[in-house]
Structures are given as C-alpha cells and as structure tokens.
Image (spheres, rainbow, N blue to C red):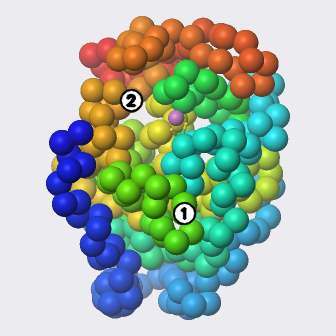
Amino acid sequence: MASISIRPPWMLPDRAVTPENIHRRRREFLRQLGFVGSGLAWGPSLLAQTPATNAPAAGPQEARRNPEFSPKLPLTPERIVTNYNNFYEFSTQKDRVAQLVGRFRTQPWSIWVGGLCAKPMTLSWDDLMKVAPLEERVYRFRCVEAWSMVVPWTGFPLSKLLAQVEPTSDARYVKFTTVLRPDEMPGVQRLSDYPWPYTEGLRMDEAMHPLALIATGLFGKPLPKQNGGPVRLVVPWKYGYKSIKSIVKIELVREQPDTLWNALAPNEYPFESNVEPNVPHPRWSQATERDLATGNRIPTLPYNGYADQVASLYPRK
Ligand SMILES: Nc1nc2c(c(=O)[nH]1)N[C@H]1C(S)=C(S)[C@@H](COP(=O)(O)O)O[C@H]1N2
Ligand SMILES: [Mo]
C-alpha cells in the first residue's frame, strides 16, 4: 500500500504518554477539579495516583453475568479462546501468540483518555476498576477471516468511561491506540513496515452504544495477555479487528481517525466494518463462518446477531 511507504508518524515517540505531557495534563486536571469540586466521585483516587505506584493489573474479575447482554449460547472452550489468537504485535500465527507474550508487561498499566472533552485524565488500574461495576457478558465474536466463537467477557460499558471525561459536542469519533513496545513484541519488529501502533476507531454513537464493552476479564479471570490484557475493547456487531487490544490511549476526535487495517488495505477493511453476511470480503464470502468450538460452518448473522440492538444506528442499510 502507498500509505506504508511514507515515513510514518508512528516512528516518533508517542507524544501523549511522555512524562512531561502526563504531568501537564494532570495539572490541567487538578485545575479543573478546583472548579468542579466534589462533582467527581472518584477524584481522590486520581489525586493519589502516580504511574510508579500503579496497582497490579491483575485482580479479581469474577462478576455477575448480565442476562440482558448474555444470550444463552454454549461457550467456546477457554483453551481455544486463549490459544487461537490474532495479535500481530506478537505473531501472525494464531497458535504462537500465547507462547510469545511472556515478556510483555501489563503491570503497571494506565490509560490516557482525552482529546475533545472537558476532563481529560490518566486512569490507573485502580481508577479503571472504579469506572463502573464489573459485569460478565456472553458475546458472539466474529473475525473478518470467517471464524467465530462465543466468549464470556468481564468489563463495563465504554460509554461509562467516556462519560467521565465529558466529551464536547465537536467530538464525533473515538480513536483507540494499543501500547507499542517493540522490545516486548516480536511481531512488531518482524512486521516493520506496518503503521504501528495498532489503532482503531468508532463513531461517537457507536462508542456510546451499550453493547460496546471495555473488557478486563475473560472466563472470570484477568484478561490474558494474548487476548489483549490487561484491557481491550469488544464491539460484538463488528468484525474482530475493531476490538482493539491492550489499550493505552482513547482520544475523542473530530475527524474519522486512521486505523491500522484501514491504512494497510482500505478496500478490505473499511472503517465501519459491521458484520454483513451479504457483503463479501474482496477475497472470500462472509455468508458463513467456522464455529471454533465445533469446527462446523454456520450462517453468519447480520450485525453478528445484534441487529435488534444496533441496526437503528445505520438507517440506510
Ligand atoms: N492490538 C491489536 N488488537 C487486535 C488485533 C491485533 O493484531 N492487534 N487483532 C484483532 C483481530 S483481527 C481479532 S479477530 C481479535 C482477536 O481477539 P482474540 O485473540 O482475543 O480472539 O483481536 C483484534 N484486536
Ligand atoms: Mo480478526
């Protein structure tokens, strides 16, 4: 692709997470606290936070299953979900990823949430655990490569996190960024012409939809590194690549953000990427999918089975 021959901006250090910028944002945040006073229920924990004292990312992830978001489907066995992975920062071979995440450090961890909002903030792991009560949800998961599984995630709605930072009215999209640590990620070094870091994006109304989940657990345990630990996005009505892993940055933006897959092959990986069985991928049909649990081919459902909940977001389709 033409886009990857250009000297890429991702070769530069990530400006949003330099100590200086974090320091400045924290000062801005503290200043805003002065105005809002006790309006922030969890202000004190942010005040106490410094990156050096971040609590471990691992922690209890048992949570009550939310039946409203958990269709009664047999779960894909845990050993399949945790050993058949797409995580190109480690390997393009799905059965290798779990073996290659050993050097990847997920503690301490923090996420910067900012951009077009009133209250940008850096959340430590403890802060993240206080955004909303954790719940378990059983979601269908459909990869663009035409395989699928059924997964019990633990997490909370993305909308709750975005509400904390109070997006401004000109925030039209949300951009997500995966951590980039080539020393810990052998696939990044191998795929050196990819536009790292991995990025993804949603429209604001998609991001605010109650199905869009921030996941921190899987099968009632901390999210394994190979599945995007310690924290990832899950957008069950879209192809799997929208569900970005190991997130360190969430930014509210005005224009549709670039995404890694869209930059590499826009005709194969459009920004919207809803699961649409009657719209073939340029290289294969999307009408059916291979169920990882049984190996059987099953029909692919519009919006991956979530049409009742999300079709209204796409009135022309
Ligand atoms: N950072 C990052 N996120 C990613 C990917 C990736 O390579 N890097 N792969 C995506 C794709 S294509 C899929 S299908 C899912 C796979 O998630 P799983 O390994 O938990 O099944 O993660 C998505 N998120
Ligand atoms: Mo995928």
Earlier-in-chain disc, 1 versus 2: 1
For image coordinates 40% across by 13% down, the residue present is 280
* Residue placed furthest toward the front: 190
Q: How far across and how far down the image is residue 244, in percent?
A: 49, 49
Q: How far across and how far down the image is residue 306, in percent?
A: 54, 23
Compare residues 6 and 295 and report the one nearer the observer: 6
Q: How far across and how far down the image is residue 173, in percent?
A: 28, 48
When asked about the image quadrant of residue 140, the answer is top right
Q: Is mark 1 within 8 Å of ligand 1?
A: no
For image coordinates 27% across by 16% down, the residue present is 316
Give the residue number, with chain letter if any, for mark 2: 273
Give the left or right position of residue 194, taking residue 89 as reference.
left
Compare residues 296 and 215 and report the one nearer the observer: 296
Give the left or right position of residue 309, taking residue 139 as reference.
left
Q: Where is the C terminus found, in terms of image quarters?
A: top left
When asked about the image quadrant of residue 59, the answer is bottom right
Give the class, few, some or many, for how many residues have Cα within 10 Å of label 2's Cα (few <14, many ≥20). some
When asked about the image quadrant of residue 106, the answer is bottom right
Residue 257 seen in the figure? yes
Give the class, few, some or many, for how many residues have Cα within 10 Å of label 1's Cα (few <14, many ≥20). many
Residue 185 numbered tag? 1
CB under 8 Å between discs 1 and 2: no
Give the left or right position of residue 105, taking residue 316 as reference.
right
For image coordinates 72% across by 55% down, the residue present is 99
Image height check: is 253 above or below 235? below
